[in-house]
Amino acid sequence: MNRIWRSIVGKLWLTILLLVSFVLFVFTVLMLEFLEDYHQQQADSSLRQTASTIASIVDNYDLEQLTDEIINEMITEDTNAFIVSQKKEVVSAFQTGLNSIEIQNNILKNKNFNDIFESTEPILERMILPSQVEEGKMETYIVLSYPLKSDDKLHGAIFIYQNPSALHKTSQETTKIVFLSAFIAFVLTTFFAFFLSSRITWPLRKMREHAFELAKGKFDETLPTTQNDEIGQLAVAFNQMGRQLKHHLEVINQEKEQLASVLTSMTDSVITFNRDRTILLSNPPADKLLQKWFIDKKFENDRPIPQEVFEMLEHVLSFEDKLEEDIEIDGSYYRITISPLKNSEQSIRGAIAVIRDMTERIRLEKLRSDFIANVSHELRTPIAMLQGYSEALLDDVVSDEEERYEITRIIYDESKRMSRLVNDLLDLARMENGHTTLYKDEVHVVDVVERITQKFTQVAKEKKVELQFKTSLSENVQISLDEDRIEQVLTNLIDNAIRHTSTQGSVTVTIEQELSYAKIQVKDTGEGIPQEDLPYVFERFYKADKARTRSKGGTGLGLAIAKNIVEAHKGNIRVDSELGQGTTFTFYLPL
């Protein structure tokens, strides 16, 4: 019930109902007053007409008996009359009911009727007289005195009064009709007011439901626009608003998706900070970077970013200025740009940080510079020797044929060394660019490894190094591989092992199965590799001999080439070493 009165239907219905009820109340009161006056006027007029007729009969006829009968016939049931002579004596009475004599006396005692015996005009008064139907009750009567034989100076009069019950009865009947009409009008008004309010508010309720649907994001529903009034125009405006909202939201979603796509596809880390230094938004690279910082966390606070970045953020939010710096955090290098974010009022609402990981770029720059330095260093020695010995030959400073032969042999060896360096560089470049072509065949891997190992038997004997071959793998096991490339890998590993193993040392080549791979190891008891150099063993131009003595040094590209060949066979290679104890190279080939 409360819900009805709180709704616009109930309020509109109640307003119309109260307004109509007020109008009906005023109309009923005025109508009752009007009808009461009208009935009284009709009663007065009836009494005057009756009195005038009776006076005419009395004046024109002297037959007393006949006159009384005629008067008695003329007087209605609710009307009473009596005739008084000029001496104020009652001559004839036509009365019914109780208290007739008392009523006559009260009327004759009224001073207002004293002039009727000398006047020619009737006198009308309202008097309170005893009731004709109930003892001890006083009622209001309409009393009319009308002169008889008014031509005489002193004459009689007829007094006519009407029982108030007749007037009351008529008024009551009229009042019932008026109240019944008012009730019917109230009921009809209530029905039509409710119908009208419902008719008006039905579109409004639909608009309210439509507004809630719009708030939920359902923009496809539309309102009917059958009406041409203000409500119909409002429905049209609602439909247009829904279409505009749908269009704007689609545009916003498209822009949001485009922005998300841009942020997701960016290789740089993007982090948006709130005014209170909390993170609002981050793209996938930023999430990975934050996870890395969290795992490697070394600062004693709850902030998700390092102290260096936080200080930059503080500066930007405090001074509203863009800041760009290159900083180093835990061995990684970053270029960080932080810019302030402003709202429509141009006040700071946060900041956006773009973080570019420069570690790989700096590493590549270092590799490039190291590569140029290494190539220059490797070429400078043979070129210097070629130039020096060539000048000796040109200047004819060689004294005998044996010395000339020795110089010629040195020039030939150094040119071969330069050729080998260039070829290794070209091979490595092709492998790193994915242009390596493997000519695979199904071969018995044990036979291949044993054959390659036996090639170095004589070299090992000359160096007084024990060379051994061991296997726990069946000789029938075959692997799909490029035999020439694998021979290149093993040649490089065994040659390095023998060259870096001192006299009375040993080099052991083993092959065995580990899970679904053939595990091949080259283990020596040589001088070993420092722990800090192990991560760089497979890089170009790495040499364990820091002095770069030409007696042991190759081109420095062999291990890099070996790593690329093994990975091209879907395998992997690793190194374990302990300084002064020896080195073990292990590589795996899928069976």
Image (spheres, rainbow, N blue to C red):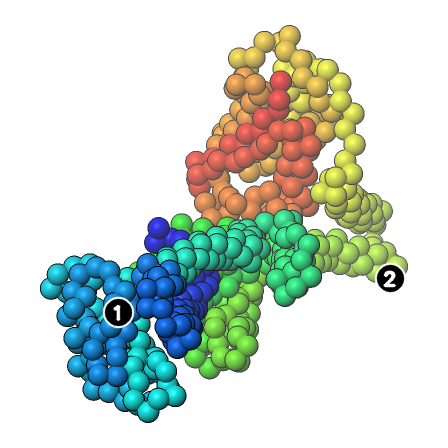
Q: Which residue carries the number 1 mark? A: 92
Q: Based on the displayed image, in which of its 4 quarters is residue 275 positioned?
A: bottom left
Tell me, yes or no, if residue 229 can be seen here: yes
> Could you say whether the residue bearing mark 1 is in a helix, strand or loop?
strand
Query: As drawn, is 480 to the left or to the right of 345?
Result: right
Around disc 2, counting alpha carbons within 10 Å, would you say few (fewer than 14), some (14 to 19), or many (20 or more)? Answer: few
Residue in the foreground of this view, choosing between 183 and 169:
169
Q: Earlier in the sequence, mark 1 or mark 2?
A: 1
Q: Position of residue 153 (x, y in %)?
A: 33, 91
Please state, as top left, top right, bottom left or bottom right, where the C terminus lies in the image.
Answer: top right
Q: Residue at x 68, y 28 (%)?
A: 569
Residue 370 in view, yes or no: no
Question: Hey, what amino acid is under mark 2?
Answer: Asp
**494 relative position to 42: left or right:** right
Compared with 96, 529 (above or below) is above
* Position of residue 271 in the picture relative to residue 425 (left or right): left
